[in-house]
Image: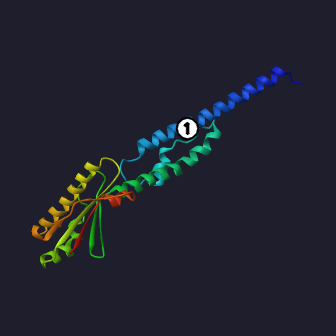
């Protein structure tokens, strides 16, 4: 038979063992995340699963309970990386042409045109050379400093106007409208400039 002291000591030993196992699991995950963070390239490149798995250390033989969290770590890391790549893609500059309207989407805080912007304006440049007027409309969102947002939207519209002029469109055939503020909605839509024919 066990005395109350023996049961108390067994409970204490059990608590220490469980605490030690939890500590080892936490330590392995922390070291793995640290190594993974250092091994991942910066920027929106994709990372092969082998590279992520190589960054995760093998669990210690004396701590079999740590194996389960370490095996989940690559999947979690890939999900985080995919989220970062998705965010970077959403923030990148791009150009879209839909129904004769060219939409320039700008990176956050930037007035630089996306690659391929000049090619996207080809039909509009031809129409302008045939006497049509091109209307440039800029947009910005209502969050943050409204004055700074409007100024950045104007810089973006001016960048588009300068690209049109560089493509041979006379300034008299370009109408630059005051940037419009969008209430709510998509951040990318608020960081755009459109060219349409009038």
**Nearer-the-camera pick, 133 or 127:** 133
Residue lying at 21% horizontally and 56% vertically, measured from the top left = 154
The spot of residue 161 in percent (x, y) is 17, 63
Among the 4 quarters of the image, the one containing residue 69: top right
Instruction: Tell me, yes or no, if residue 170 can be seen here.
Output: no
**Which quarter of the picture shows residue 98?**
bottom left
**Taking the image as drawn, is residue 196 in sight?**
yes
Residue 89 on image: x %, y %: 37, 57
- Image point 57% across, 36% down: which residue? 26
Say what secondary structure mark 1 lies in: helix
Please name the residue that numbered disc 1 is placed on. 28
Q: Residue at x 22, y 57 (%)?
A: 156
Mark 1 neighbour class, 10 Å CA radius: few under 14, some 14 to 19, many 20 or more: many
Q: Quadrant of the N terminus?
A: top right
Looking at the picture, the colour scheme in use is: rainbow
Quarter residue 118 falls in: bottom left
User: In this figure, what is the number of numbered marks?
Assistant: 1
The answer to whether 37 is drawn above or below residue 152 in the figure is above
Residue at the farthest bottom position = 130
Residue visible at 34% across and 53% down in the picture: 142
Would residue 43 appear left or right of 50 to someone viewing this image? Answer: left
x, y (%) of residue 95?
Answer: 28, 65
Q: Is residue 17 above or below residue 163?
A: above
- In the rendered image, residue 58, in percent from the top left (x then y), is placed at 55, 42
Does residue 117 appear left or right of residue 45 in this picture? left
Quarter of the rendering occupied by the C terminus: bottom left
Give above or below for 76 relative to 26. below
């Amino acid at each position: 038979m066990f005395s109350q002291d023996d049961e108390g000591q067994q409970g204490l030993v059990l608590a220490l063992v469980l605490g030690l196992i939890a500590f080892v699991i936490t330590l392995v995950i922390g070291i793995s995340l640290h190594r993974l963070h250092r091994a991942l390239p910066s920027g929106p490149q994709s990372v092969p699963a082998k590279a992520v798995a190589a960054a995760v250390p093998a669990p210690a033989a004396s701590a079999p309970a740590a194996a389960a969290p370490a095996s989940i770590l690559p999947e979690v890391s890939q999900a985080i990386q995919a989220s970062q790549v998705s965010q970077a893609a959403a923030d990148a500059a791009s150009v879209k042409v839909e129904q004769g309207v060219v939409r320039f989407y700008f990176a956050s805080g930037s007035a630089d045109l996306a690659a391929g912007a000049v090619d996207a304006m080809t039909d509009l440049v031809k129409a302008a050379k045939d006497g049509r007027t091109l209307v440039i409309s800029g947009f910005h969102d209502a969050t943050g400093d409204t004055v700074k947002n409007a100024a950045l939207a104007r810089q973006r519209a001016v960048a588009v106007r300068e690209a049109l002029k560089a493509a041979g469109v006379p300034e008299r055939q370009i109408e630059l409208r005051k940037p419009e503020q969008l209430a709510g909605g998509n951040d990318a839509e608020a960081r755009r400039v459109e060219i349409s024919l009038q």
